[in-house]
Amino acid sequence: MPPKRDQVYDALRTVQDPDLGKDLVTLNMVKDVRIDGDQVHVHVELTTPACPMKDKIRQDVVAAVQAVDSTIRDVHVEFSADVRPPNEKLHDQQSPLPNVKHVIAVGAGKGGVGKSTIAANLAIGLAQHGAKAGLLDGDIYGPSMTTMLGLQEVPGRVRENTLLPFEVHGIKSMTIGKLVEPEKPLIWRGPMAHGAFKQLATQTDWGELDYLIVDLPPGTGDVPLTLAQLLPLTGAVVVCTPQKVAQDDARRAVRMFEQLGVAVLGIVENMSYFIADDGKEYDIFGRGGAEHMAKEMSLPFLGCLPIHMQLRKNCDNGQPLENWQQETLAAELNGLCQNLAQQVSIASASGAYVQPTLSVQ
Ligand code: ADP
């Protein structure tokens, strides 16, 4: 006799999502169970298409279902994904971007550490996994996305009072770099910076997004403050190079987010080391420094990226998708994206989302 659906569901109650710490049935991740003779089909809906735990979940489902009955020959696990919004999100009307599930800031203590590079590749990498991803170039003092995304010849479009995002490389993007003359210095007084950022963020027609990655200006200035007050943030990523002086600034950025009530989802160590043509690795800046800092501060470490000439070239040429054609680079970037998606799912499930409050002395 083939097993009953109830028996299969009971078995699936013993399979935990390793990140969320609850079983698949309780988490409402089991969307369907079909029994066809000695074949069982299970449809599991993941909380992100970039889930790094997919293989583990598959193995656990197969083992649990096979243990139900010796007559079961094959267990087929089919995955889909639906990114879940933070579970303690305030009423959607209160967010100026109600159709954006997760806003994630990417910050750094100082300029030149690769913050924009990481922000762009995180958005593109999440989109490669099938997520709806957007990228807001919030670096209103030194926007680099026109170059990094190759937007120079892409015409800007507006509809009534809304800016239509640039749809390139699988993502939707907006940058002030396309709204001003290329070499014009961008000098903003505090309130103007606030206004410019707010307009870019809220007057862009983002449509529905799973993840909106916001590339912040370096340091701890006006824009992070505006962002935290304007949009409900799921959290922030801090990019850091390994050396001590960079870590000191990154710590300040972490503290800033904490003070703004924004959860730090993780640290990325960029320019971690250099691989020469002969394959030899050089720890130019002291590999592992940012990872060590993350440990000390009890923050998740999302991974590291070496100094990679191809990455720099693809950035300069506005061809970020080329990064996914280069095996090692693709693997490293993919790891970062999956680890970030994982932290977003964990933060969402645990209700870590907080409405920022800040008293400015
Ligand atoms: P930030 O946003 O922190 O100011 P950028 O992302 O603009 O830094 O990066 C500065 C420069 O360093 C860019 O030319 C970029 O292509 C390059 N770069 C960043 N990360 C790497 C890396 N891992 N390997 C090689 N070049 C990199």
Image (cartoon, helix red, strand yellow):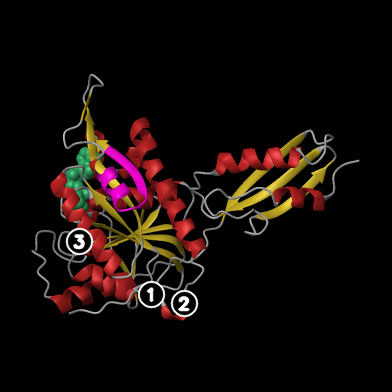
Label 2: element kind: loop
Task: Count up the numbered dots.
Answer: 3
- Amino acid type, callout 3: Pro
Q: Nearer the viewer, mark 1 or mark 3?
A: 1
**143 or 288, nearer to the observer:** 288
Badges 2 and 1: C-beta atoms under 8 Å apart? yes
Question: Residue at 27% across / 74% down in the picture?
Answer: 198
Q: Which mark is residue 90?
A: 2
Q: Nearer the viewer, mark 3 or mark 2?
A: 2
Question: Residue at 36% across / 41% down in the picture?
Answer: 333
Please, which residue is most extreme toward the top here? Answer: 278
Question: Residue at 26% across / 38% down in the picture?
Answer: 288
For the residue carrying disc 3, how many other residues have a C-alpha within 10 Å: few (<14), some (14-19), or many (20+)?
many
Q: Is residue 291 above or below residue 259?
A: above
Image quarter for ligand 1 equals: top left
Q: Is residue 260 above or below residue 77?
A: below
Label 1: element kind: loop
- Look at the image and say whether residue 312 sits in the magenta stretch: no
Q: What quarter of the picture does the N terminus occupy? A: top right
- Amino acid type, callout 1: Gln
> What residue is disc 3 on?
217
- Look at the image and say whether residue 293 sits in the magenta stretch: yes
Q: What quarter of the picture does the C terminus occupy? A: bottom left
Q: Position of residue 145 (x, y in %)?
A: 24, 55
> What residue is disc 1 on?
355
Label 3: element kind: loop
